[in-house]
Amino acid sequence: MWDFDVLVLGSGPGGQKAAIAAAKLGRRVAVVEKKHMLGGVCINTGTIPSKTLREAVLYLTGLNQRELYGASYRVKEEITVADLGMRTQHVIGREIQVIRSQLGRNHVTVLQGTGRFLDAHTIGVTGDEERKVTAERIVIATGTSPARPSSVEFDDKMIIDSDAILHLDRVPETLVVVGAGVIGIEYASMFAALGTKVTVVERRERMLEFCDLEIVEALKYHLRDLAVTFRFGESVAAVERRPRGALTVLESGKKIPADCVMYSAGRQGKTAELCLAAAGLAADDRGRIEVDENYATPVPHIYAVGDVIGFPALAATSMEQGRLAAQHACGEPVAEMQELSPIGIYTIPEISFVGKSEDELTRDKIPFEVGISRYRELARGQIIGDSYGMLKLLVSSEDRRLLGVHVFGTGATELVHIGQTVMGCGGTVDYLVNAVFNYPTLAESYKVAALDAMNKMRVIARLTAEL
């Protein structure tokens, strides 16, 4: 009756995992994707390019080695866009090959073109030729694109968004970043490391509001050391193009000249071309689609996963959403996604955390103790030249369970998974105190922080017993 059992719109992390999961369950599966966008935004313009760019910046600038070899140390004196782009294009190419191979091995049909609903079971695919395909179940995984305020005249050269920043013809000497969210701060830190004079404009009073305040303050200190200027509580009134750059005018009257202005105003769900109404669906003003706990839309046989459904809009969670949606669509038993999902922010230095923050625990009146380990106190920290990194454990004062783990510094996005595993298994700080870690490693910071928290709790217990 149907051309396919499951049809997936989009081949990003969510769509790819949904397609493969359905194929593993023996279903006939197809993926609709534009000709040169296999892997979606994640592989081509988002996560992978930006994180590869970050690694290229760290290597070529020698930033991580300056603690050991001096502030003037650089691997390459003049770093060009070509230097940065070479590594990025290599990784993108390899990742696309991996995805193409995975889809091929699992007999997933790739339909090249742009898909749109003709009715609730029929998709029109516009590519080299127009065709119609039908499917019993459909998964929407079209992702997002950078939001572009209508008041801003983007030209992709002087006034750009986070997609266009990957295609600059040169490394700018000065840069204004509008928006201090994750993407804005990641790029601000990368270009600051390259030697660009960066100014960050943010209408709120602080950046990364969902992060631990102490960690954010540490990042802010480090970025200021790289000559980043912050303008918090400020809004942009206008951006004026000039022959030699752009002039950003703030509502307070300040004027900031720069070679380039990057807007980081959030992301917009890519649903405008889907003709959702033909399937009985609608998106909100940010292009997001509403789903239930199984990622099913109000039309039960149509699912949506990934960034197009909104928070947390992470590649890692999108992958799991895609897998779970496919299982539910195929009538397989589905377990709920683990609540303990880590957050990774690839600034320089990087940040990662899992669980609760101090502010959240204080607000909820949950008593806790803090254990801290600093990289400069670890042999591994000295070896790699990281004197600023830190790991913070939040421990329940009542039953000694781990309530939160916050890491700042080299390897933060890797280290956080140790704490995530302990928390997911209901472990206590005692496990970390008694565990033996390889020496010298950064993982050893867990034992140091656990001992710090334990010693504080011991003092409190002794004083309480004396009353």
Image: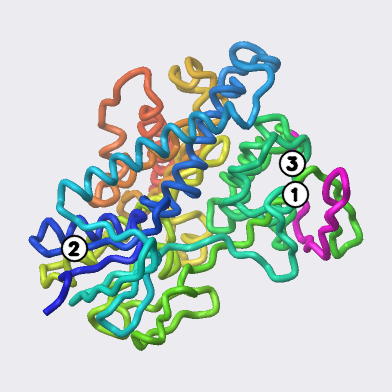
Residue extending farthest to the right is: 253
In the displayed structure image, the side of residue 37 where residue 135 appears, left or right: left
Does residue 242 belong to the magenta stretch?
yes
Look at the magenta stretch and give its main secondary structure.
Answer: strand
Which residue has dot 1 on it? 158
Q: Earlier in the sequence, mark 1 or mark 3?
A: 1
Q: Position of residue 259 (x, y in %)?
A: 79, 43
Q: Which residue is mark 2?
A: 29
For image coordinates 28% across by 55% down, the residue present is 16
Does 8 appear above or below 281? above
* SS under mark 2: strand
Residue underneath mark 3: 198
Q: Are marks 2 and 3 in contact (CB under 8 Å)?
A: no
Which segment did they paint magenta?
Answer: 227-248
Q: Is residue 462 magenta?
A: no
Q: Amino acid at mark 3?
A: Val
Residue nearest the observer in this picture, 413 or 183: 183
Sequence order check: which comes first, mark 2 or mark 1? 2
Q: Position of residue 196 (x, y in %)?
A: 73, 34
Q: On screen, 341 above or below 416? A: below
Residue type of the residue flagged with mark 1? Met
Instruction: Give the spatial CA distance, label 1 vs label 3.
Output: 15 Å
Residue 319 x/y as whole percent: 30, 55
- Looking at the rendered structure, the kind of residue marked 2 is Val
Is 346 positioned to the left or the right of 355 in the image?
right
**Which quadrant would residue 448 be assigned to in this image?**
top left
Question: Quick check: 236 left or right of 145?
Answer: right
**Residue ID at (49%, 35%):** 88
Q: Does residue 197 lie above or below 118 as drawn?
A: above
Badge 3 marks a residue whose secondary structure is strand
